[in-house]
Image (spheres, helix red, strand yellow):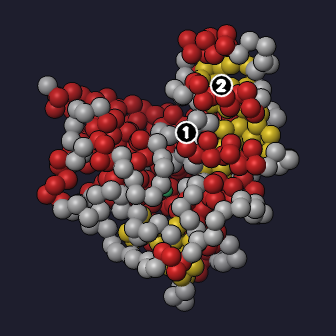
Amino acid sequence: MKHLAILGSTGSIGVNTLDIVRQFPEEFKIISLSAGHNIELLKDQINRFRPKVVSVINQEVATNLQKSLSGLEVEILYGVEGLIQVATHPEVTQVVSAIVGAVGLIPTLSAIKTKKSIALANKEPLVMAGKIVMEEAKRNGVQILPVDSEHSAIFQSLIGHRKEDIRRLILTASGGPFLNLPISKLHEVTVKEALLHPHWEMGKKITIDSASLMNKGLEVIEAHWLFDIPIEKIVVQIHPQSVVHSMVEYIDGSIIGQMGIPDMRLPISYALSFPKRMNLKMASLDLSQVGSLTFSPPDPEKFPCLRLAYQSIEIGETMPAVLNAANEMAVNGFLEGWIKFTDIPLLIQRVMGEHEIKTARTIEDILRADQWAREKTKALIEAKAR
Ligand code: MG
């Protein structure tokens, strides 16, 4: 039986993970959970799965939650320290790292240091500190199993093959809600329109990232570290049907890909049960119903975020962390109505341009760059809003 910790239990990955746990109670036991703002859902999860430790956002929320759970034996913690306790609890064997954003970095790294197997959905630890995270995983003999559908597809397509035989990784992207919108209209799109993702149900931040293709940019960086493949060998193809989740091309010209209906329970369950597969009783993918699968290259003019992501990893060191922090702040600025959708890449480019690149040897180096970029982006947004 696997003993799980879920970082981000009320988000879409967390909820889907718990759905799998509920279906297979003989395979999994929940030891610890963490959540952000959705306390009502967290309460339901505590009542149902009876974790030993739970972490929330701050002390006030922790105190209120503790009061409302009187009679239940559960330890309520909060803040970064709480997240670390959730991730490193001695009984936990696998951590599902599903917090969105940079805040997932430290708890994920702590889990690796305490030799927990990692099911990774949180992109930012690899985007910000890929080298450090992968070295730490290697040193501790920890396997990082991808939960992101694209990386799960690549992971599955690599099995039984030699790394030296890889020609390219082909990441597919749905193209988001603005794929067919003329570039001249992009500056006037609303938050509501940007939040309408054609295929996947996800949180707000990642849905905006999908609309700007920054999500794909972050995934390219994630794939670079996860599979140790040079960035120039990773390409993106727009595939609006979201049926082929990603592919690997080998030196003989063969392309191996993974297909399936777009349901996150599929890649999550694979990361939880690898190398075995779970009988999820999913509907079959009916390809004749889908009819046709189309692929096209992304438009670099329309989606500059993708180019910025490539640039950041080519520069390396602290730059990907700066890209990520500037993006988080800019997306937030857009969601709150301070800036336009088309300001997101402009802000990121400006912040990257002003960043003095530093060697990213330690997590502190990364966090300093992250902090600098957040303050810089915030100041630029405030100047715009004035
Ligand atoms: Mg993805």
Q: Nearer the viewer, mark 1 or mark 2?
A: 2
Mark 2: amino acid: Lys
Which amino acid type corresponds to the residue marked 1 in the rendered image? Gly
In the rendered image, which quarter is residue 370 located in? Answer: top left
Q: Position of residue 273 (x, y in %)?
A: 75, 56
Residue at label 2?
43
Front one among 222 and 215: 215
**Residue drawn 58% across the image and 42% down it:** 98
Q: Do labels 1 and 2 touch, CB within 8 Å? A: no
Is 224 situated above or below 194?
A: below
Please state the horizontal and vertical placement of residue 317, each as a whole percent of the image: 42, 48
Q: Which mark is drawn over residue 220?
A: none
Q: Residue 347, percent across and down?
A: 24, 42
Quick check: 44 left or right of 169? right
| Residue 4 coordinates in the image, percent (x, y) | 75, 41
Q: Secondary structure at mark 2?
A: helix
Distance CA(mark 1)–CA(mark 2): 14 Å
Does the rendering let one see residue 262?
Answer: yes
**Of the pair 366 and 89, the residue shown nearer to us:** 89
